[in-house]
Amino acid sequence: MNENENENENENAEPGIFGDLIEGLEEELNAKLLEKRAAYALACARITGAVYVEAVAAGTPADLAKEMATDAWMKSMGIPTPQIIAISADEDDD
């Protein structure tokens, strides 16, 4: 074998090693990201439950407390909440 053939073999071997290293790292990072997201979702669920329990304990009707907890969940999870625009009777007559 000449010198150029040895270099080509080394170049071909390195991407495999590098690819395996990157693949393993990617899997590890994805697993850690999934774990962080799960922990965040669990914390949000606990907070949402606390919003509901505290609202009901303070005398808020259960349906309203459920809506409050739903809003808290949606905001904490980054889900867009629908915007309700109230129109007064005076504005409706125009």
Image: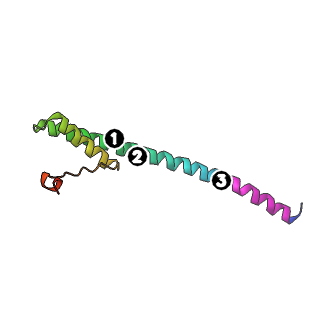
Residue with the mark numbered 2: 37
Which mark sits nearer the N-terminus, 2 or 1?
2
Residue with the mark numbered 3: 19
Q: Which residue corresponds to the image point at 64% horizontal and 50% vertical from the top-left? A: 20
Which one is in front, 6 or 28? Answer: 28
Mark whose residue sits in front, 1 or 3: 1
Quadrant placement of the C terminus: bottom left
Type of the residue with mark 3: Gly
> How was this image coloured?
rainbow
Which mark sits nearer the N-terminus, 3 or 2?
3
What x and y, as percent, mark residue 13?
A: 74, 55
Residue at the right extreme, as displayed: 1
Quadrant placement of the N terminus: bottom right
Q: Which residue corresponds to the image point at 80% horizontal and 58% vertical from the top-left? A: 9
Question: Label 1's element?
Answer: helix
Q: What residue span does the magenta drawing correspond to?
A: 4-16
